[in-house]
Amino acid sequence: ISLASTPTPSLLSIYDIQYTTNANGDSPELGNTVTTKGVITGIVKNGPTANSFFIQDSASAWNGLYIYALNDSSLAIGDSLEVTGTVDEFNLGSSSAKVTELTSVTNITVLNSGNSLPSPVYATTGNANSEKWEGVLIEVATAICTSNSVGFGMWSLDDGSGVIQADDDIFAYSTSALVGLYYAVTGISHYTFDEHKILPRDINDISVGVGVNNFDQQVINLKAY
């Protein structure tokens, strides 16, 4: 999908774009036009950023990237892409922290489709609040739902290490989440409105009562509900 006839810059890995030692989390490629490759792991479906998407090239930290490109709905999860755009740091909130993204996209080339996705990387709910997981498919487990009324489609998860918000950019679930039950959630790590979040992609990314010592009690509560 050629969006403009501009020269293609040198190819960089997602790690080259994401990894940073800057205290503010800014990419070392901030402001540069770059080309990178990765497999689509999720596509935003809800809100003003619908059809933007995430790519990843390895199941490890610093290897996922948010692509802010809203003009193409023909892409699919599992597509391997070559993407050219400008590296930006963006946040709609007031915090100095931002999400690294590729914007002003000038070229998206589908290399092939139907690829296997990277395995989700396990993270505690506290550790999931980290720059290194941006755009990476992660999993939190044995995490209790502490609130399903955060607002804006979010619900809170805490495994005892700190709270991470699950958000509805791709899949809405907050009205189904039950406070006090334990969950295992797979999703893409993202940062918006001053918060790190996990974005489950469909119902298969959410399991109830997984890895809980008092699972029988959770089932009783669920039946009562």
Image (spheres, helix red, strand yellow):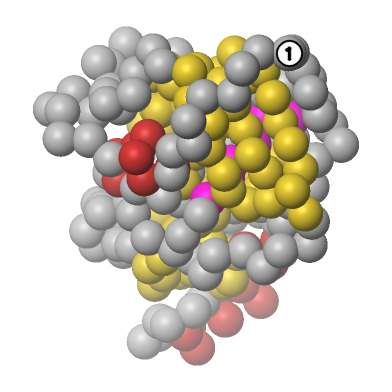
In this view of the protein, which residue sits in the foreground, 39 or 131?
39
Report the side of 107 relative to 11 (left or right).
Answer: right
Q: Is residue 196 above or below residue 86?
A: below
Residue 152 seen in this snapshot? no
Q: Position of residue 169 (x, y in %)?
A: 63, 36
Please report the residue visible at 57 percent of the width from the left and 44 percent of the height from the top: 37
Residue 217 within the segment the image draws in magenta: no
In this view of the protein, which residue sits in the foreground, 191 or 134?
134
What residue is pinned by disc 1?
5
Report the side of 84 relative to 184 (left or right).
Answer: right
Report the side of 86 relative to 83 (left or right).
Answer: left
Q: Quadrant of the N terminus?
A: top right
Report the side of 76 relative to 192 (left or right).
Answer: right
In this view of the protein, which residue sits in the foreground, 109 or 69?
109
- Please identify the quarter of the rendering in which residue 130 is found: top left
Q: Position of residue 149 (x, y in %)?
A: 52, 38
Q: Is residue 204 above or below residue 210?
A: above
Please report the residue visible at 51 percent of the width from the left and 76 percent of the height from the top: 209
Q: Position of residue 206 (x, y in %)?
A: 60, 64
- Residue type at mark 1: give it: Ser
- Please identify the quarter of the rendering in which residue 145 is found: bottom left
Which segment is the magenta one?
Answer: 47-56
How many neighbours does mark 1 have within 10 angstroms: few (below 14), some (14-19), or many (20 or more)?
few
Secondary element at tag 1: loop
Please report the residue visible at 42 percent of the width from the left and 82 percent of the height from the top: 211
